[in-house]
Image (cartoon, rainbow, N blue to C red):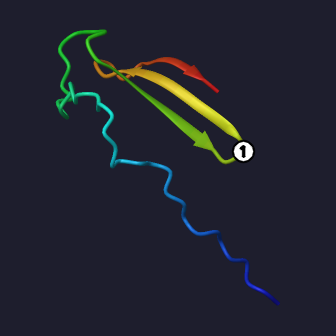
């Protein structure tokens, strides 16, 4: 019998660069007063070689757009 070894974790983010970084406009203030004022987005990789992307409004929590 043999144990199945996982590959070592590979770092893919280089945070020590001289490129400009986008400003943090939201500054962790998630209270929104109007519809369409703040939208958030995310891209998620699912291990079945699939990417999932979505855009959500913070005012009412409605998912505005999603793409599998």
| Residue sitting at the far right | 1
| Horizontal relation, residue 2 to residue 24: left or right | right
Vertical placement of residue 2 versus 45, above or below: below
In the picture, measured across the screen, residue 50 lies left or right of residue 44, that is: right
Which residue is at the front of the view, 1 or 57?
A: 1
**Residue at the location (67% across, 48% down)?**
47
Q: Which residue is mark 1?
A: 48
| Residue farthest along the front direction in this orientation | 18
67 relative position to 36: left or right: right
Q: Residue 2's image quarter?
A: bottom right
Residue at 63% x, 43% y is 46
Helix, strand or loop for disc 1: loop
How many numbered circles are shown? Answer: 1
Compared to 11, does 8 lie above or below?
below
Query: Which image quadrant: the N terminus?
Result: bottom right
Residue 20 % position (x, y): 29, 31
Q: Residue at x 54, y 60 (%)?
A: 10
Crowding near the residue tagged with mark 1, few <14, some 14–19, many ≥20 C-alpha atoms within 10 Å: few
Q: Quadrant of residue 37?
A: top left
Coordinates of residue 24 in the picture (x, y in percent): 22, 30
Residue at the image point whose x is 30% and y is 39% from the top? 18
Question: Which image quadrant is residue 27 in?
Answer: top left
Q: Quadrant of the C terminus?
A: top right
């Amino acid at each position: 019998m043999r144990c199945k070894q996982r590959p070592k974790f590979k770092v893919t983010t280089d945070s020590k660069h001289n490129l400009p970084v986008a400003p943090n406009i939201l500054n962790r203030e998630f209270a929104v007063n109007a519809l369409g004022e703040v939208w958030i987005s995310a891209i998620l990789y699912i291990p079945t070689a699939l990417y999932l992307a979505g855009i959500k409004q913070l005012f009412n929590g409605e998912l505005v757009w999603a793409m599998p």
